[in-house]
Image (spheres, helix red, strand yellow):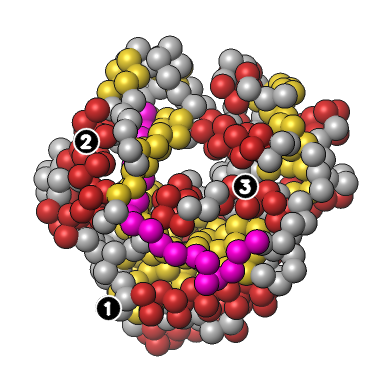
Amino acid sequence: MFQSVLIANRGEVALRIQRACHGLGLKTIAVYSEADREAPHVRRADQALCIGPAAAGESYLNQAAIIMAAKVTGAEAVHPGYGFLSENALFAERVAEAGMVFIGPSAASIRVMGDKVAAKRAMRAAGVPCVPGPDAALPDAPDQIRDLAREIGYPIIVKAAGGGGGRGMRVVEQETALLGALSVTKEEARRSFGNAEVYIEKFLARPRHVEIQVLADRYGNTLWLGSRDCSLQRRHQKVLEEAPAPGIPEALLAEVGSRCVEACKQIGYLGLGTFEFLVEDGAFYFIEMNTRLQVEHPVTEMTTGIDVVQQQIRVARGERLTFTQADIRCRGHAFECRVNAEDTERFVPSPGTITRWDLPGGYGVRVDSHAGAGYRVSPYYDSMIAKLIVHGDTREDALGRLRIALDEMQVEGIATNLALHRRLVRDQAFIAGSVDIHHLEQRLREGELM
């Protein structure tokens, strides 16, 4: 039952965790880079310690510096947020070895689910449907690899076993391109993830990206908290999310959700996690599990009425879940827009100082952000500056509220993707629901959203 939490992150997620901790009466400790010295999460922390220069590799990714800061400040637990070290099994291990609680699953669970080949094997054992393809590392012999690809059927996709964030994957349309794609992906995987292992599976032509949120305590209670649709993506990066996933029968979601629960029990999973699926022609196919808090968690909070960050902290403290699966109900519909500091003509980051910051408001509107007028957007970190979240009684109601909120939100001094979001929520295919993961890029290529 720890009383202090070191937040090993920055930006809006650091503030979100900080608020959850303060709501539970817990002391918060912020670590920060020199670039974040004046950041809101630093000012509002009970204690704060600088851990290095602006570059993430010398600060927020510096495990030794963070562990030392935790020891010096007397932190009893560490929350990694998302990104940075949140899915690093070695970091989770080092936190535990230092006598502190890692607010997340065990290092063993992170390792199993972080290796996509091992994760696929574990999911199949739990009865979770997977994308067609072997759940083992590829053989070395080129002829055997070609045989496996023919068995799956082209097109296929080559993926890094330790990949993530949309990196380490290539689509192969025909056999002549297979070995070249394998070679390039292996090298990218080695450089990006320190693991050159790759695997292949069927490339689905027009799938949706649907997620199932789970929550587990250490007493065998595991629940699924509804679904999210994250199909609006560019280069595998999510742009806009919603809950619940539209157009999917409740009975099918319940079946998949129960299988995710069973998978968590089989691997001894603790805390928050997200199962990600591709959905095509009414069939779910597991692709990966995120063993951490997700950027898009607010849409689940808005539709379930559950503060998932506080629940994540509570189960890490050893508390039992106080609600059951029967208590979980989806109430209405929610959307989240990721507001990025980026030039959407070229899709490049737009660092600089924000000179105008007008936020929307009203019933059912929420903005999670660390920015404001006068805030300097750093070139060193992710370009997301805010998350605009709305809730309504129905999808149509929520979408109407989102349009108004986007029109009200005004940011100047830097380029943002707000104009893109305003066009997206008026796109007829998106309004109808159930767009696939290629929809946004196709519309951009056609010039429909420019």
- Residue extent of the magenta highlight: 322-344
Mark 3–mark 2 Cα distance, whole angstroms, equals 30 Å
Residue at figure coordinates x 73%, y 36% from the top left? 26
Q: Which dot marks residue 281?
A: 1
Q: Amino acid at mark 2?
A: Ile
Q: Residues within 10 Å of mark 3 (few under 14, many from 20)?
A: some
Mark 1–mark 2 Cα distance, whole angstroms, equals 33 Å
Mark 1–mark 3 Cα distance, whole angstroms, equals 36 Å
Label 1: element kind: loop
Q: Quadrant of the C terminus?
A: top left
340 part of magenta stretch? yes
Which one is earlier in the sequence, the residue at label 1 or at label 3? 1
Q: Is residue 402 left or right of residue 107?
A: left
Whether residue 48 is situated above or below residue 98 in the rendered picture: above
* Pointers 1 and 3 in contact (C-beta within 8 Å): no
Whether residue 7 is situated above or below residue 297 in the rendered picture: above
Which one is earlier in the sequence, the residue at label 3 or at label 2? 3
Residue placed under numbered mark 3 in the picture = 310
Residue 374 visible in image: yes
Q: Residues within 10 Å of mark 1 (few under 14, many from 20)?
A: few
* Pointers 3 and 2 in contact (C-beta within 8 Å): no
Residue placed under numbered mark 2 in the picture = 404
Q: Amino acid at mark 3?
A: Gln
Task: Pinpoint residue 31: horizontal percent, then vertical percent.
Answer: 69, 28
Residue at figure coordinates x 23%, y 50% from the top left? 397
Q: Amino acid at mark 1?
A: Asp
Residue at figure coordinates x 40%, y 34% from the top left? 367
Question: Which of the two residues, 106 or 162, is positioned nearer the viewer here?
Answer: 106
